[in-house]
Image: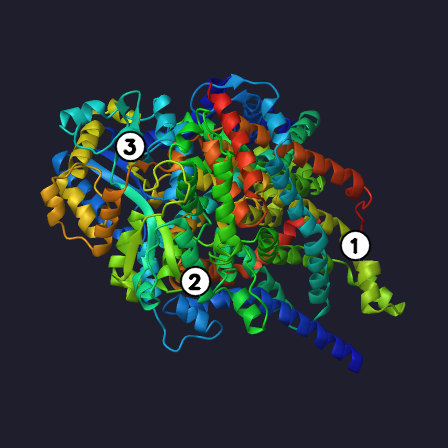
């Protein structure tokens, strides 16, 4: 009876398109990056094998570690700042009856814009003389802040922009999870005398842990490939203060004409992503096993 | 895994689409992509010149069309062209810098050898200097104009406050202190792109350590962290600390520095001669139109080498893809482009309309008759008085060193490092780059 | 009851403040776009200008080919999202519903590796790979990598969804004499629509946003996508914030209109497939 679903030609026909594209654009480039990562190559001439030199260079370069640090800021900021905000506002929206649709629609708006436009818009907001923030600050009697030009502010400015763009996207996801919790569970708790806050913590939170875990995973993935927002807003500057691994790869690979080194960085980005994902799975995801309801 | 094997499936997917795309286009006409950097109001005249040249080419060579591709100069130089050279996808005609860039691309055979073409067109002795575009005796690019760097200043402010054009660096500093005390920013600057801040630094170190020092970095004869260099950068960082530049200028785009001068917020600005056209245009300069003067970086007391040498040369122009020579029509178009672009008429036009200094030996009578602003005359006069000229450092050092000093100067301005520490780091990169080259 | 309604209004106040904070940047840009120059923005940052200056819109339209960029992005993002869905749903069907469980398990694991490879990391090797084809510098140089780039995510989401479809359904269809293709198009695909919409939206947003490849792989102005075109525009007119604001407004308005019309579908679509999936 399984014959219809056991036809080798059909199986191959169904699998072939993605396998070709997947191998061409994931596996082959990855293998190629590994191969070229061990060479000295200017991208134009022939590549010469140079052993671990590229990796040694990266590991001894403060600027590389600085870019790793900035990637971690992206992750830490989303986990410890964005996620609580997301959960808070999702709970708040789920509890109101009126205007729920409006809130849901409005918070999502920044997420439909392209990152480049978001970066341009926010560069204007951070502009030292006529930007929104400094006008507000000076009106309130504070000194203006050099948002994108002072190393200590530049990274946080980018993180705020990134959060502005994506918080709403995740709120909508978490909200849907909250709203899909069967009413009876909540009502039972009301009868038991639990107040809104207690219900939020004791009942809703455990039930939405799986989706929060998804949000965190997506944030990590987003953090590891963040580059466009940095390029648009600061180009990694001032003085490399906001470089992330991907912009470091472009600067030290393409601009410096060192494609071998650039490929080594690509490999390191992959390795770091792997490590973080495994750590996350081992330490956190395992403990918050899916709650079935 | 061999690449050719993997390419088979990819090309199969593409076959249909690419075939459709290429059929028909092959014979009738050729389209050349022209990568230029003449974007925005300030460079409108230069874009007009380019367009007129291309019109001339289309008339001379039938069946040639052009697609213009305008990209920001720094992006083109450091990202687009770099990557296109590696992937063999550079446009037929492109904005090119002489020096290190040209050497790199020429040594890998990516640039069209122009030596026979300029011979054929009788241009071989017409350029003032092709040095930055010459590699092993062959010419790979042609400069569109000359440039020179110096201080632009608000003349009115100087007269009102009875200030004098400084003769020495000490006088310049005193001047800056006075301006600062009067509540203005002494030096306009906007160095989100680090080369802007490095213009001042480059000439400053040439005053302290002599212009020749820069030639020695790539050969190992001189060092970035030599005492004179440290002194020059320490001076620079003193100026930053004393508030001689606008706070937060590290986040501002290059074009913003001339606005600081135009708005009257800053009084002096170190910039290239190419900026002069802005101050001749009422639409851009407003009240500051024709109110701007020019003086060279003054001499340092006890400085080494020529103290009147200017940072100047012929480093920016057009280069052509080596692939052009495989197609007779494209080659004809390139020849015609060179003929139409590089001649006395266009040189004078560039000078008159835009204050671009000639890169060719234009008849001196014609130059004298050219209608140019007082500012351009001042710039030419400074050049004539100068004892020597030196190219910008980025034409002389490897790309990695340029990246290192670019990051370094921004860190120095941001107060994240000291002159000594920064130059030590740059020297390390320099040594590594020199080793690589061997 | 009093307390309860007060609590509700507190919630509304907090939410409204949040909305204003989120949406005010748009208003700031909109107001700025009608002002004559930077000076006018600085002197009256929060209000509308006394006289509307529409010149900015005219100049921004001439100086940046936003219509061209916008159309390029729209068609590339749509085409690639659809292409990804078509080929990925075929594969997800083969993996979850066809009777090659062992091979399929291996295939799924193999594709899962792709989730660990951050897209931007492969910029250089993909660039070099495309170099050897004739498509570099054409839209295909974006369309094919974009289509390929979304495969792992799409296959995983669709597989998860298809796996949850009860087996009885297709068993009945097999009895009715449907082939695998028939089961796929007539039975499984219609049920999967919510998940298809979800991945379409996520992939569309990803493609619509993509900057790095579009920046490096395309070399002519008329082929640029919106993100690259807008950044180019910013690089040139970076000191004229009034004109730049007009450019930003141009690039936002069509998206807002599309979102306004489809917001229900987009928001529900985004969550329908992912929450249960």
Q: What element carries label 1?
A: helix
Rendered location of residue C204, percent (x, y) = 52, 48
Same chain? Circles 3 and 2: yes
Res B141 → quadrant: top left
Left or right of A284, for residue B280: left
Q: What element carries label 2?
A: helix
Q: Of the residues tagged 3 and 2, which is closer to the observer? A: 2
Left or right of B225, for residue B170: left
Mark earlier in primary sequence (3, 2): 2
Question: Is A97 drawn above or below residue A234 in the view shown?
Answer: below
Q: Residue at x 19, y 38 (%)?
A: B341
Rendered location of residue C107, percent (x, y) = 65, 28
CA distance for labels 3 and 1: 64 Å
Left or right of B26, for residue B255: right
Q: Which residue corresponds to mark 1? A: A207
CA distance for labels 3 and 2: 46 Å
Badge 2: how crowded within 10 Å, few (<14), some, or many (20+)?
A: some
The subunit letter for the residue under badge 3 reads B
Q: Which residue corresponds to mark 2? A: B178
Q: What element carries label 3?
A: strand
């Amino acid at each position: 009876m399984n014959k219809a679903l056991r036809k080798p030609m059909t199986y191959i026909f169904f699998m072939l398109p993605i396998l070709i594209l997947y191998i061409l654009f994931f596996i082959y480039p990855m293998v190629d990056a590994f191969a070229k990562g061990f060479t000295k190559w200017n991208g134009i001439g022939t590549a010469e094998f140079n052993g671990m030199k590229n990796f040694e260079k990266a590991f001894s370069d403060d600027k590389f570690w600085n870019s790793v640090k900035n990637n971690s800021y992206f992750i830490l900021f989303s986990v410890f700042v964005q996620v609580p905000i997301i959960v808070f506002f999702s709970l708040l929206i789920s509890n109101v009856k009126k205007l729920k649709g409006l809130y849901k629609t409005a918070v999502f708006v920044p997420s439909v814009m392209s990152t480049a436009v978001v970066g341009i818009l926010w560069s204007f907001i951070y502009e030292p003389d006529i930007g929104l923030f400094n006008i507000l600050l000076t009106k309130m009697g504070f000194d203006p802040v050099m948002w994108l030009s002072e190393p200590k502010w530049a990274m946080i400015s980018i993180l705020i922009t990134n959060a502005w763009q994506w918080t709403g996207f995740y709120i909508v996801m978490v909200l849907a999870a909250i709203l899909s919790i069967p009413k009876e569970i909540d009502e039972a708790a009301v009868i038991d005398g639990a107040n809104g806050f207690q219900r939020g913590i004791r009942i809703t939170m455990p039930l939405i842990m799986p989706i929060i875990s998804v949000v965190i995973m997506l944030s990590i993935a987003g953090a590891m490939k963040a580059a466009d927002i940095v390029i648009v807003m600061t180009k990694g500057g001032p003085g490399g203060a906001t470089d992330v691994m991907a912009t470091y790869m472009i600067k030290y690979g393409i601009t410096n004409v060192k494609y071998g080194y650039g490929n080594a960085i690509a490999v390191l980005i992959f390795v770091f992503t792997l490590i973080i994902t495994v750590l996350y799975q081992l330490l956190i995801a395992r403990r918050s096993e899916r709650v079935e309801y | 895994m061999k690449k050719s094997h993997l390419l088979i499936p990819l090309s199969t997917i593409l076959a249909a689409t690419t075939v459709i795309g290429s059929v028909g286009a092959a014979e009738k006409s050729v389209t050349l992509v022209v990568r230029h950097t003449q974007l925005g109001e300030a460079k409108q005249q230069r874009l007009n010149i380019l367009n007129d040249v291309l019109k001339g080419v289309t008339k001379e060579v039938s069946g040639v069309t052009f697609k213009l591709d305008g990209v920001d100069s720094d992006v083109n130089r450091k990202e687009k062209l770099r990557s296109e050279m590696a992937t063999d996808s550079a446009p037929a005609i492109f904005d090119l810098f002489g020096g290190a860039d040209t050497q790199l691309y020429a040594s890998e055979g990516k640039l069209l050898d122009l030596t026979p073409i300029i011979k054929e067109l009788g241009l071989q002795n017409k350029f003032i200097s092709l040095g930055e575009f010459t590699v092993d005796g062959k010419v790979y690019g042609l400069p569109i104009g000359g440039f020179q760097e110096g201080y632009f200043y608000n003349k009115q402010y100087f007269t009102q406050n009875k200030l004098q054009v400084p003769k020495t660096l000490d006088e310049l500093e005193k001047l800056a202190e006075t301006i600062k005390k009067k509540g203005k920013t002494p030096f306009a600057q906007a160095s989100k792109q680090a080369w802007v801040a490095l213009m001042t630094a480059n000439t400053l170190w040439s005053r302290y350590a002599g212009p020749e020092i820069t030639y020695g970095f790539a050969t190992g004869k001189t060092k970035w962290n030599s005492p004179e260099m440290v002194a020059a950068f320490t001076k620079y960082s003193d100026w930053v600390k004393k508030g001689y530049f606008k706070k937060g200028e590290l986040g501002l785009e290059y074009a913003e520095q001339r606005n600081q001068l135009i708005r009257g917020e800053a009084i002096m600005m170190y910039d290239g001669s190419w900026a002069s056209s802005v101050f001749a245009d009422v639409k851009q300069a407003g009240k500051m139109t024709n109110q701007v003067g020019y003086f060279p970086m003054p001499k340092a007391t006890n400085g080494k080498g020529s103290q009147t040498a200017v940072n100047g040369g012929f480093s920016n122009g057009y280069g052509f893809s080596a692939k052009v020579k495989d197609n007779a029509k494209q080659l004809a178009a390139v020849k015609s482009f060179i003929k139409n672009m590089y001649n006395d008429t266009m040189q004078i036009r560039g000078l008159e309309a835009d204050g671009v200094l000639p890169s060719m030996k234009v008849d001196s009578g014609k130059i004298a008759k050219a209608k140019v602003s007082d500012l351009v005359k001042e710039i030419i006069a400074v050049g004539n008085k100068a004892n020597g000229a030196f190219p910008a450092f980025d034409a002389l050092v490897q790309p990695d060193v340029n990246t290192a000093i670019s990051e370094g100067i921004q860190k120095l301005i941001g107060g994240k490092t000291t002159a000594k520490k920064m130059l030590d780091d740059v020297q390390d990169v320099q040594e590594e780059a020199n080793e690589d080259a061997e | 009851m009093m307390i309860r309604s007060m609590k509700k209004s507190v919630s509304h106040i907090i939410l409204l403040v949040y909305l204003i904070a989120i949406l005010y940047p748009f208003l700031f840009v909109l107001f700025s776009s009608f002002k004559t120059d930077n000076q006018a923005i600085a002197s009256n940052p929060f209000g509308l200008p006394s006289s509307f200056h529409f010149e900015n819109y005219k100049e921004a339209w001439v100086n940046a080919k936003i219509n061209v960029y916008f159309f390029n992005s729209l068609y590339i993002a749509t085409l690639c999202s659809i292409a990804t869905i078509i080929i990925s749903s075929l594969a997800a069907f083969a993996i979850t519903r066809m009777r090659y469980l062992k091979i399929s398990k291996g295939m799924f694991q193999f594709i899962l590796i792709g989730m660990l490879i951050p897209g931007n990391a492969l910029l250089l090797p993909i660039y070099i790979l495309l170099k050897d084809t004739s498509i570099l510098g054409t839209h295909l140089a974006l369309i094919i990598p974009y289509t390929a780039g979304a495969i792992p995510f799409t296959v995983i989401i669709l597989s998860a969804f298809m796996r949850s479809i009860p087996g009885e359904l297709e068993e009945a269809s097999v009895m009715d004499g449907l082939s695998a293709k028939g089961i796929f198009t007539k039975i499984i695909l219609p049920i999967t629509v919510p998940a298809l919409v979800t991945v379409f939206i996520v992939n569309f947003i990803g493609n619509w946003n993509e900057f790095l490849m579009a920046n490096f792989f395309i070399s002519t102005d008329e082929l640029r996508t919106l993100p690259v075109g807008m950044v180019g525009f910013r690089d040139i007119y970076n000191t004229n914030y009034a004109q730049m604001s007009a450019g930003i407004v141009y690039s936002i308005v069509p998206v807002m209109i599309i979102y306004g019309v489809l917001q229900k579908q987009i928001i529900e679509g985004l969550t329908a497939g992912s929450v249960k999936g």
